[in-house]
Amino acid sequence: MSREKRLLTRPMTITTLMLGVVAVVVMVMGTEAPAALALESCNTGNECVWDQTFYQGTRTEVNCIGGEHGLTTKWSAKNRCANKKVVLIWHEGEIFTEKACMNPGGNRPEPGHFNAIIVGAEGSRC
């Protein structure tokens, strides 16, 4: 390969490498940072839900008492119930659509919109 061709391909290699680094940084910040925020902002013994994805916006805490709990539209959730699953539901009329199921300690930064949660019985899992 001539010197001119090598010089022309070198910037592409550097650009590709830089894009790879940026992608890794975005991936790490996009998953671990919100999860850490959720851990800090949700008390043990509660299911926490937010009105925006990635644990942003207004947080609502729901006690881990079993059964269905109706909500306004929410977009992210954290299960801090000690030993119970939590199911995120979109409830419209007589139709219930399961959006996600979380075991204890589970996080859902963007499960899609939901407006109800069902807290399972003691020892329940997804």
Image: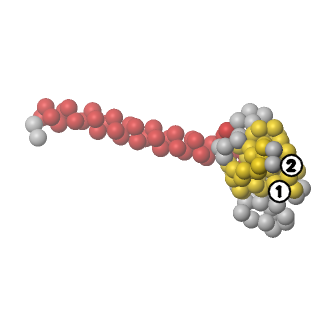
In this orientation, which residue lies closer to the viewer: 102 or 115?
A: 115
Is residue 28 rendered to the left or right of residue 35?
A: left
Q: Secondary structure at mark 1?
A: strand
Q: Is residue 23 visible?
A: yes
Give the residue at mark 2: 69
- Residue 38 locus on image (x, y percent): 72, 45
Q: Is disc 2 in contact with disc 1, using a CB cutoff of under 8 Å?
A: yes
- Few, some or many C-alpha atoms within 10 Å of disc 2 (few <14, some 14-19, many ≥20)? some
Picture layout, residue 50 above or below residue 89: above
Element class at badge 2? strand
Residue 67's x, y, as percent?
Answer: 87, 56
Type of amino acid at the residue the image marks with label 2 = His
**Residue 118, horizontal then vertical, whole percent:** 81, 54
- Taking the spot 38% from the left edge, 37% from the top edge, the residue there is 18
Q: Quadrant of residue 125?
A: bottom right
Q: Earlier in the sequence, mark 2 or mark 1?
A: 2
- Left or right: 29 as drawn, with respect to 93: left
State the quadrant of the C terminus.
Answer: bottom right
Residue drawn at point x = 15 percent, y = 34 percent: 5
Q: Is residue 78 above or below residue 2?
A: below
Q: Residue type at mark 1: give it.
A: Val
Q: Residue furthest front?
A: 94
What crowding class fits label 1: few (fewer than 14 Cα within 10 Å), some (14-19), or many (20 or more)? Answer: many
Residue 65, given in percent of the width and then of the height, sits at: 89, 56
Looking at the rendered image, the quarter that the N terminus falls into is top left
Q: Residue at x 76, y 50 (%)?
A: 96
Residue that numbered label 1 is attached to: 119
